[in-house]
Amino acid sequence: MNGKIFIIEDEPSIIQLVQHNLEKEGFIVSSSINGNDGLKELKKI
């Protein structure tokens, strides 16, 4: 496992593309479609 990455992006298609490629490289990927929700989620992690 290479690590964890959190993506904040408002375009779902971009999230899917980046997430797919990062997961192929062994990363654990989480995401959010807006900054406020993303920051809240990161605080939980």
Image (cartoon, rainbow, N blue to C red):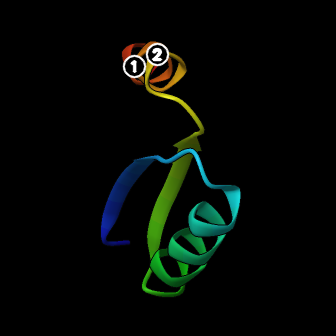
Residue at 49 percent of width and 48 percent of height: 9
* Numbered label tally: 2
- Image coords of residue 44 (percent x, y): 46, 14
- Where residue 24 is drawn, which disc sits there? none
Say few, some or many: other residues with alpha carbon within 10 Å of mark 2 (under 14 / 14 to 19 / 20 or more).
Answer: few
* Rendered residue at 54%/19% (across/down): 37
Image coordinates of residue 13 in percent, x first then y, are 68, 67
Quadrant position of the C terminus in the picture: top left
Q: Secondary structure at mark 2?
A: helix
Q: Is residue 33 above or below residue 42?
A: below
Residue depicted at 40% across the width and 24% down the height: 42
Report how far apart the C-alphas of labels 1 and 2 lie in the structure: 5 Å
Amino acid type at mark 1 = Leu
Label 1 SS: helix
Residue 8 appears at what percent x and percent y?
45, 42
Q: Are marks 1 and 2 in contact (CB under 8 Å)?
A: yes
Nearer the observer: mark 1 or 2; the answer is 2
The residue that mark 1 highlights is: 39
In the picture as drawn, the residue positioned furthest to the left comes out as: 2
Give the number of the disc on residue 36: 2
Q: Is residue 5 above or below residue 35?
A: below
Q: Position of residue 35 (x, y in %)?
A: 43, 26
Which quadrant of the figure contains the N terminus?
A: bottom left
Please tell me which residue is depicted at 51% across the width and 84% down the height of the picture. Answer: 21
